[in-house]
Image (tube, rainbow, N blue to C red):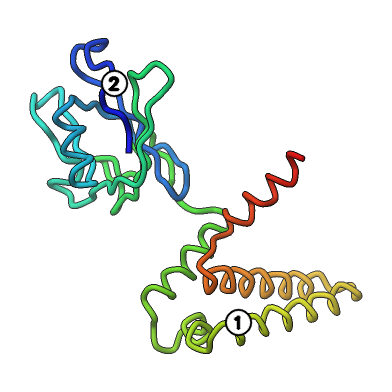
Amino acid sequence: MIDISKLNFEKSGGLIPCIVQDSLTDKVLMLGYMNAEALAKTLKENIVTFFSRSKKRLWTKGETSGNFLHLEEIKIDCDNDTLLLKVKPDGPTCHTGADTCFNETNSISNLQFLESRIQERKNNPKEGSYTTQLFNAGINKVAQKVGEEAVELIIEAKDNSKDLFLGEAADLMYHYLVLLSAKDFQLSDVITVLKARHSK
């Protein structure tokens, strides 16, 4: 994942500061410190463990609250003396009960929220769920629904009803994300293609 030999633990007395970021929302959750042992434990278990400066021992975040930080990705900064940990939190990160140690709300405010809900239904089907019904119907049905919703959006675009137009736009976006998921792609894959086109 990373080349640990590059890290400069001695610069700060054996500890390296670690910025912890939610891998889904990109919100910064907290700042902690690791020594070499804490980093090794984190990489082995994929659960974030720090070195507590006050307790003078290894401390796995969530060991008492149950709000563990599941490691998704780790990066080293340009000076090899700071880590960026991208994680999936089980719950609030701060000991006060706040989402973050900076008292910010950690929530998804864009299409990632809808995409994550769709993926959840794909991974864990639920009886009575429309999304589950779509996945069960197969790729042809999902693709057909995208086509139908696109036509309905075009029809509403010719009229002047804001609510109906936005409603059809939302329907198309939802079914489009279901189609991407059914094909095992994410919106980020499409964005990568768009960025590549933009750079030319």
Residue 155 image offset from top left, x and y in percent: 86, 79
**Quarter of the figure with the N terminus:** top left
Q: Which mark is residue 12?
A: none
Left or right side of 134 for 103: left
The three-letter amino acid code for the residue at tag 2 is: Leu
For disc 1, the marked residue is: 142
Q: Residue visible at 59% across and 68% down? A: 177
Q: Is residue 103 above or below residue 76?
A: below
Residue 126, placed above or below residue 157? below
Q: Which mark is residue 7?
A: 2
Q: What SS does tag 1 mark?
A: helix
Q: Is residue 99 visible?
A: no
Position of residue 102 measured from the top left corner of the image (x, y, whole percent)? 38, 34
Please tell me how crowded label 2 is: few (under 14), some (14-19), or many (20+) other residues with Cα within 10 Å: some
Residue 20 drawn at (x, y percent): 35, 36
The correct choice, above or below, for 134 with respect to 104 in the image is: below
Residue 168 left/right relative to 27: right
Amino acid type of the residue tagged 1 in the rendering: Val
